[in-house]
Image: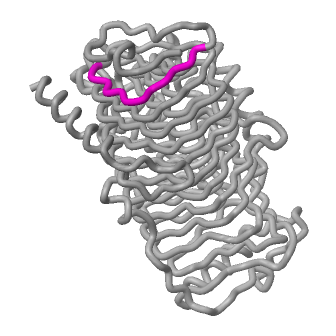
Amino acid sequence: MKQYHIILSSLLFLLFSCKETAQVTSHSTNFEPEWINKVGAKENKIKSKIYYANDFGAINDGKTLSTKNIQKAIDECSKNGGGTLTFKPGNYLSGSLFIKEGVHFNVPKGVTILGSENIADYPEIDTRVAGIEMKWPAALVNVLDQKNVTLDGEGTIDGQGKVHWDYYWNLRKEYEAKDLRWIVDYDAKRPRTILITNSKNVFLKDLNIQRAGFWTVQVLYSEYITVDSIKIRNNIGGHGPSTDGVDIDSSKWILVQNCDIDCNDDNFCLKAGRDWDGLRVNRPTEYVVVRDCIARQGAGLFTLGSETSGSIRHVYVSNIQGYGTKNGLNIKSATNRGGTVEDVYMENIKMESVGTFITVSMNWNPAYSYSKLPAGYTEETLPPHWKKMLTKVEPESRGIPIFRNIYLKNIDIKGAKKAISVAGLKESIVENVNLKNVQITAETAGNIAYSSNWILDNVTINALDHSTLKIENSKNVDFSKSAKLD
């Protein structure tokens, strides 16, 4: 059976190899899966009536909390069948806003929505954060259980996140001293900037978003969503923890394009639940396109995981440029997480000053990934999310992740510290990795362990230390014959 899979994978890659090589400036190639034209939101027909938040008492001085006034305008707009809710020039201080069906929430040029620095202005809701369903503060802008919504404008949404960053680092120092690194990210409650949950046919376009308190944009349990031409700048005034750019979480038929992200964690990230709770929910992320984007500072140009429990599959990424991004393709999970990552296509990628281009780990960040209750705690009195994190995955084999069927084409990487770092497990081999037209210049070549069936065509790794890839416990992974190492 294994031989059959190897032969089939080889035939498929030969088929791709016969196609015309795409230019980096184009995302219309024969490498594309046929489903990619089905992703994204469909046209929204918004009523022409315009509502100004100012007419409902919103103050544009950047100091007066206007949450209730802006929400009143949103509610009135939706109640009357929809329309455009917008603002006169100025700065508006707000806590959580909840956008409703048929509303076009427009932040025009000259307008800044400032997120309140008081966590009490973000009411707790039932949601999912970092793979666990729990109570957590609502985002600054929320689309919950809605359809046919547009969020756009050339203005700015500023999360004013530094107060939340400082809170996290202080709590983390306290928790690490108690051997509680695994739970601090869930107890340090911080607001996301934009949350789209259980919704359909939503456009998020053009906005300038900065200084997120936590994740910037999370698309959760939703379908047919378009994120287009947003600019994220989270490294203003510091480097906030977990300030991801765009997180697609247990959602499908998603289009992300023309975005420019500078953050302090994963730039573009796909997630699908964590550990026992993620396996319980068991909802995949699938049919996702990310194209024509820029990834600047951040932990990963394109990351899958670490929350993989519900599986991540049918993914197409094209025409992404990276500048100073820590990793290129980053696939990560843990041995209590489970799920399958498969059918991932990535092409037309250019990066400069990268950490490691391909990073694959099934035992990622153990101090964070594995929950263990220290002495002195009584489990019966713990918060519900602690109990979820401590619930064992049984049988243990259910927690072993699977990574397979990864296709990379037309890759140009300069100034990497390491070319490749792949670490599968004895129990779970990383299978069927296909590289075509891949050129990487790096300080060192790197390593591959517990992997099989790499198909290589025109692959060059230029290691400045003259090293070659260290390959261990792997089969059919031979860079000496099919690849060129300078």
Position of 392 compared to 235: left or right? left
Q: Quadrant location of residue 165?
A: top right
Q: Nearer the viewer, residue 119 or 467?
A: 467
Q: Quadrant location of residue 16?
A: top left
Note whether residue 435 is visible: yes
Q: Nearer the viewer, residue 434 or 193?
A: 434
Q: Is residue 112 above or below residue 191?
A: below
Q: Nearer the viewer, residue 222 or 378?
A: 222
Residue 110 picture location, percent across and down: 84, 71
Tell me which segment is drawn in magenta.
452-463
Note whether residue 281 is visible: no
Residue positioned 85% across, 66% down in the render? 91
Q: Nearer the viewer, residue 68 or 440?
A: 440
Residue 484 picture location, percent across and down: 45, 19
Residue positioned 56% across, 53% down in the render? 25
Residue 278 picture location, percent across and down: 36, 38
Position of 59 compared to 485: left or right? right
Which quarter of the rendered picture does the N terminus lie within? top left
Residue positioned 73% across, 40% down in the render? 164
Residue 116 part of the magenta segment:
no
Residue 460 part of the magenta segment:
yes
Residue 68 picture location, percent across and down: 71, 71
